Image (cartoon, helix red, strand yellow):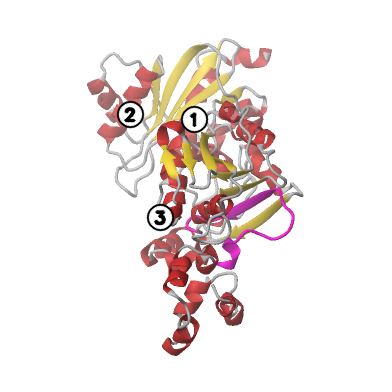
Amino acid sequence: MTEEMRKLPQETGEQGFQSVAECLANLSDQQQHKLLADLSDQDCETLLYDWHFWARHNQLAPEGKWHVWLVLAGRGFGKTRMGAEWVRMLAEGATPLKASTKNSVRIALIGHTISDVRDVMVEGESGILMQSPPDQRPKFEPSLRRLTWPNGSVATLYSSEEPDQLRGPQHHFAWADEIAKWRYGEDTWSNLMMGLRLGEDPRAMVTTTPRPTSLIKQLMNDQNSAITRGSTFDNRANLSPAFLEHMERLYVGTRLGRQEIYGDYLDDTPGALWQYATIDQARVKTHPDLSRVVVSVDPPVTHGPKADACGIVVMGLSDEGHLYVLADLSSQGETPAQWAARVVRAYGAYEADRVVAEVNNGGDLVENLLRQLDPRISYRAVRASRGKVARAEPVAALYERGLVHHVGRFDQLEDEMCSYSGDVGQKSPDRMDALVWAGTELLLQQGHAPRIRRV
């Protein structure tokens, strides 16, 4: 890329939000010809794979000394492309089509699940394979969880569901994607950092939509972190107008929109009964033997794309009187027959002894649906006689006393719990409601209250 091209975003005053390619496309035919006339075929091919030509300024790695590059941005900002191109540069060298043959590096690629790493970071439309020049494209061996470049550089795939995979391996660099979703975030991150020790300047890049987890807060407060922020609308030129209109119409001006579109880091909602820190402190990897397990259901009144979700939460009770959230199987848009089948499968899979379902609006519908699928199912109908906040307060108090543990992460459920305050106009917290009914059934009903007093 020529120096004249490199200056285009500065000259148009859009350095943060327009790439060189976008600026070039906005020039007159005469101006374009002047800038492109002297380029050879090799130069033009190089531009296809030159990230500095296609990237907006706020998608390029920050200058200066940093250990972690933390990219907190809304959906559609281009985070995956940023990560893939950063890995390419490390593995191939800074010049497109002229990869380094001298210094090979070892890179860790970590995502929420191994499928996320493969489907998004490696094979996705914006992933490493799609963005690599044909003659420099790494060989992908899924069974070995490994990418190997022609110059010997290697990237290994890891999952946050198995943090111990990162015990032992050493790396020069790491790309960690969507850490806000990681099931065992802090364990995975600490194992990664202990092995990030090769070379003179080991570094990690983190790309994520922000959520108020303790790990993200830790990285934000680390003086060795360089932070890039951005919104969905920064990438307007590469996104569908229909998608942008939909996001703007539904989410701009909302708390969820601030987080998911503008990439804002939002702490706990004032007036909410739960705080992320409280849930984090009691989070566990496994659960002890359970004396009871229930599947709790908060059924929607209607079904379809715009209907409320069907809240389905699985919770167990230990002999010590502690509750363990085992699964959030909530679904949106399913027919009654579909979510009923989901409930029955969960009842069997978790060896539950009861299904608890709210029937204020559904009457006998829920029980009839479940018994058609499994006549032997143990069922209890519950009816809401108080508001959601009043009903949830006793269960929230159990969390404050350290009596409730989440086995892993349940992001959508936890977001509902920590954002619902009961204010007028808030969306129905269907997952939270199901959790409250489960906690009420296990500890606050059936004579279990004395156990709380003994802990």
Quarter of the figure that contains the C terminus: top right
Res 134 label: 3
Image point 57% across, 43% down: which residue? 176
Q: Quick check: can you spot residue 22? A: yes
View extreme (front): residue: 102
Check disc 1 and report the residue beneath it: 435
Tag 3, which secondary structure?
helix
Q: CA distance from mark 2 to mark 1?
A: 16 Å
Q: Quick check: 225 left or right of 155?
A: right
Q: Quick check: 58 left or right of 429?
A: right
Q: CA distance from mark 1 to mark 3?
A: 50 Å
Q: CA distance from mark 2 to mark 3?
A: 45 Å
The residue closer to the viewer here, 97 or 118, is 97
Measured as percent of width and height from the top left, residue 454 is found at 67, 12
Magenta-colored span: 56-77
Say whether residue 95 is magenta: no
Res 342 label: 2
Amino acid at the residue labelled 2? Arg
Mark 2 or 3: in front is 3
Among numbered discs 2 and 1, the one appearing first in the sequence: 2
Amino acid at the residue labelled 3? Pro
For label 2, count other residues whose C-alpha is less than 10 Å away and answer few (under 14), some (14-19) or many (20+): some
